[in-house]
Image (cartoon, rainbow, N blue to C red):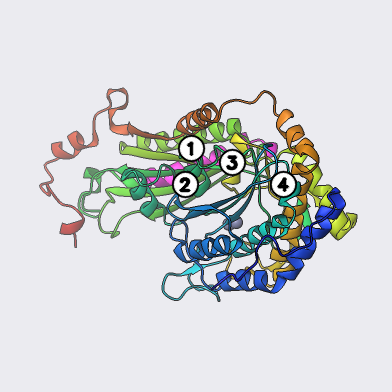
Amino acid sequence: MKSGGQGAGDAAEPAGGVGELKRAAREAIERRRDRLLQVSVYLQRHPETGFREEHGAALVADWFDGMGLPFETGLARTGVKARMKGRGSGPTAAVLGELDALLLPGHPLADPGTGAAHACGHHAQIASMLGAAVGLACVREHLDGDVVFFAVPAEESTELEWRRELVRSGELRHLVGKADLIARGAFDDVDMAMLCHTSGENAPRLSVGDSHNGSVVKRVSFEGRASHAGASPWRGVNALKSATLTLAAIDAQRDTFRDEDAVRVNAVMPYGGSAPTAVPDRAELDIVIRARTVDALRHACDSVDRAVSSGALALGTAARTETTLNYLPHHQDPVLVELCRANAETMFGREAVAQGWHRGASTDMGDLGEVMPVLHPFTSGAVGDAHSRDYRVTDHVAAAVEPAVLLAWCVIDLLASGAGEARRVLASRGPRRPAAEVRSAYEELRAGFDADSAFDGADYGGASPPCSRASADGNGIAGSGPEGVE
Ligand SMILES: [Zn+2]
Ligand SMILES: [Zn+2]
């Protein structure tokens, strides 16, 4: 799909007042409206999961090429980043678009081959990012700072085993896109970042200032010992029961989670034995822990770790836990939020703009918000619940074109007139620290969560291991396991 000649010089040069610049940017976006709608619809129908978004990345690169913007490709595998120079050397504001889809076979617009489907509306973000670039290109000579346009990969947590392999091989440093981009320094030359995400059905026209939970994923495995479930169950060490006790112990602690921390602990059991005729010698749990703050996340993780230990201890199994911080809690910059609100109210009217609320879901914009001021409004334009088979963007003007105007206007406010607003945003965060120092503190925060741990319930307190009792009874079915049972 060719972007065509949406060059920077196709609009009359505005006189320079902020209102004039905004009008010019809006008109430029309106002129490209059909092309932007095509991008949103086209990507919706060509979904790709995280770190595999080659098609979407190529489209973005082609668009940047058509605009004459210098750009880099292949950042965290598929990220594409362009820089538009302003007239001065002020702060750099980034407009982002997330490239990835979910893995959701059965979604009406799912790719029949891969099962990928845009059930979170990210395709519209790419169109709004490109639209903002079109709008800002015609006013760039009035901006006292640069604008980065960045198509970023892998916001969603999908195909985690494959991603863990990429981390182990050194190709990735983290499991989600923005975390990986931060770690490799791809945001070192950016001072603040924004994107506009689609909301769910019956959402307000625009919601400004929402926060999100952070999240940690734990993969827990319990190792016990198999035995014949009928003939010699006493010789077994039941890993499945360790797993079910762990779930019960987690549930028993839910009262300790404070309402304001918005803690969620959700688990599934991918494996709990292969046949009821044998005592299961292995069980696995995948657990996602979410909370509103880093401290609450740590508290909830401690609760889950104790629950795992209790399950292992009760049965005498060996528990191994692989813990990975998935996303940090997401909080938007209050100065950016107010600036966005003013623009949104101008565009849509005061009644149409909702005060943001706390969402139990998570996003890697939380990671970016840890290292720089971020803005993340939500727009209407979709039906269904996000991440469900019913979810799809149906109004691409609301989801893609109007957010392009909104984002362009926010950048104009930040970077026009000496970039005073951008400097105010940065000043509100206290003294600047070198990018490398910020990145290192971020990595340290992540590393405080990431760990592989082991707890052997059979070792506790010198209790007799179950095998000594079993071997003393002379049952004579030694070596009986799942393979040998009938
Ligand atoms: Zn999503
Ligand atoms: Zn999303």
Please tell me whether mark 3 sits on a helix, a strand or a loop: helix
The answer for how far apart the CA atoms under marks 3 and 4 are is 15 Å
Residue 368, label in figure? 3
Q: Are marks 2 and 1 in contact (CB under 8 Å)?
A: yes
Image height of 339 relative to 398, above or below: above
The answer for how far apart the CA atoms under marks 1 and 3 are is 27 Å
Kindly identify the amino acid type of the residue bearing the numbered disc 1. Val
Lower sequence index among marks 1 and 3 = 1
Circle 3 or circle 4, nearest the eye: 3
Please tell me whether mark 1 sits on a helix, a strand or a loop: helix
The answer for how far apart the CA atoms under marks 3 and 2 are is 24 Å
The residue indicated by pointer 2 is: 287
Horizontal relation, residue 238 to residue 119: left or right: left
Q: Are marks 1 and 3 in contact (CB under 8 Å)?
A: no
Q: Are marks 3 and 4 in contact (CB under 8 Å)?
A: no
Kindly identify the amino acid type of the residue bearing the numbered disc 2. Ile
259 drawn magenta = yes
Q: Are marks 4 and 2 in contact (CB under 8 Å)?
A: no
Kindly identify the amino acid type of the residue bearing the numbered disc 4. Asp
Kindly identify the amino acid type of the residue bearing the numbered disc 3. Leu
Q: Residue at x 53, y 46 (%)?
A: 178
Instruction: Tell me residue 315's x, y (percent).
Output: 33, 38
Circle 4 or circle 1, nearest the eye: 4
The residue indicated by pointer 4 is: 210
Magenta span of residues: 241-260
